[in-house]
Amino acid sequence: MTGGEEREERRNDPGDDGETPADPLEAAGVDPVVPESATDAAGEAFADDAEVREFLREVADDVRGDSSESKQLSAVLYRVSDLYDPDESTSPEEIYLNVRHIMRIKEQGGIER
């Protein structure tokens, strides 16, 4: 079979509607809902730990660069450091859901306006 025939066969595949690929979690058969064990852990308080908070923020500063990926990683590290800050109100579940949302937007090529 030639390359052109293979492309034509894939194009005519009834499962391929030409749309963007399905959500990777759905395609892998993974339930995107946060498991109860994680939400139970999310209810646990994180102790105020200035040393951990500062370490995470230093790493976030170090990895931040010009690329969007390094900026995203830096932002995630800052959000995680908020878990150890008594003045911030966040949970591991909120961080996970926020990061998942950002990754889906990035996969789509940005926010459609």
Image (spheres, grey):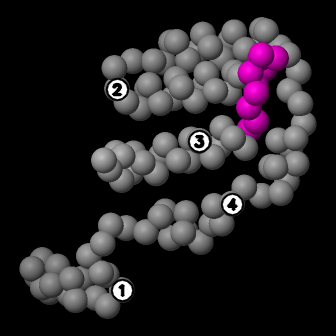
Left or right: 104 as drawn, with respect to 67? right
Residue at x 76% of width, y 27% of height: 89
Q: What's the CA distance linking mark 4 and mark 1? A: 26 Å
Counting residues from the start of the chain, the first of labels 1 and 3 encountered is 1
Badge 2: residue crowd in 10 Å (few <14, some 14–19, many ≥20):
few
Labelled disc at residue 98 = 3
SS assignment at label 3: helix
Q: Position of residue 50 (x, y in %)?
A: 79, 9
Badge 1: residue crowd in 10 Å (few <14, some 14–19, many ≥20):
few
Counting residues from the start of the chain, the first of labels 2 and 3 encountered is 2
Image: magenta residue range: 83-92
| 109 to 5, vertically: above or below | above
Labelled disc at residue 33 = 4
Q: What's the CA distance linking mark 2 and mark 4? A: 29 Å
Q: Quadrant of residue 98?
A: top right
Three-letter code, disc 4: Val
Q: Are marks 2 and 4 in contact (CB under 8 Å)?
A: no
Residue at x 87% of width, y 41% of height: 43
Counting residues from the start of the chain, the first of labels 4 and 1 encountered is 1
Q: Which residue is mark 2?
A: 67
Counting residues from the start of the chain, the first of labels 3 and 4 encountered is 4
Which residue is more in the foreground, 17 or 13? 17
Residue at x 54% of width, y 69% of height: 26
SS assignment at label 4: loop
Q: Which residue is mark 1?
A: 15
Tell me the mark number nearer the camera, choosing from 2 and 3: 3
Q: Position of residue 70 (x, y in %)?
A: 43, 26
Q: What's the CA distance linking mark 2 and mark 3? A: 20 Å
Q: Position of residue 10 (x, y in %)?
A: 24, 82
**What secondary structure is the stretch in magenta mostly built from?**
loop
Residue 96, visible in the rendered structure: yes
Q: Is residue 37 magenta?
A: no
